Amino acid sequence: MSTTDMRAIVIRVLTDEADQADRVEVTPHTPLADGGLALSSLSFMRVLIRLEDELDVEIDDAAVMGSRLTVVEDLMTVVEKCVATGA
């Protein structure tokens, strides 16, 4: 799967799950929480589970917890690393 396809899946899943996605354009620079998608912790967990299912990859808890995830690009980077390492 190409990086472009993977990023499109991340944006689609975020758009489906985020409370504010209908009011905010989802781009790599969109904040995940305040001032952006307003993802709750539960919504964020649903996003991670859907990404694991759709990309057939395990998103390592340590990769998520050890990252500063403030904008969509940050999540894309974590997902790309997990796919690349087969996590």
Image (cartoon, grey):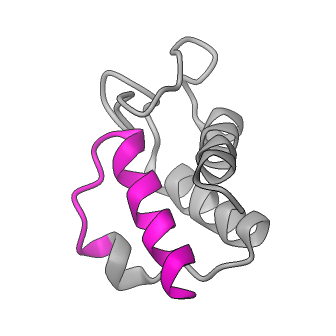
Q: Is residue 29 magenta?
A: no
In the rendering, at what x and y percent does residue 51 appear?
66, 62
User: Residue at (57%, 30%) from the top-left corner?
Assistant: 19
User: Residue at (53%, 56%) from the top-left corner?
Assistant: 42
Q: Is residue 12 above or below residue 21?
A: below
In the rendering, at what x and y percent does residue 43 appear?
56, 50
Q: Is residue 39 above or below residue 74?
A: above
User: Residue at (51%, 54%) from the top-left corner?
Assistant: 44
User: Residue at (56%, 11%) from the top-left corner?
Assistant: 23
In the rendering, at what x and y percent does residue 24 appear?
51, 15
Question: Could you say which is closer to the camera, residue 40 or residue 3?
Answer: 3
Q: Is residue 67 magenta?
A: yes
Name the residue at the top extreme: 23
Q: Is residue 54 above or below residue 82?
A: above
In the rendering, at what x and y percent does residue 26 appear?
53, 25
Left or right: 50, with 29 as reference point: right
Q: Which residues are magenta?
A: 65-86
Which quarter of the image is occupied by the N terminus?
Answer: bottom right
Left or right: 32, with 46 as reference point: left
Q: Quadrant of residue 17?
A: top right
**Chief secondary structure of the magenta portion:** helix
Picture mark count: 0
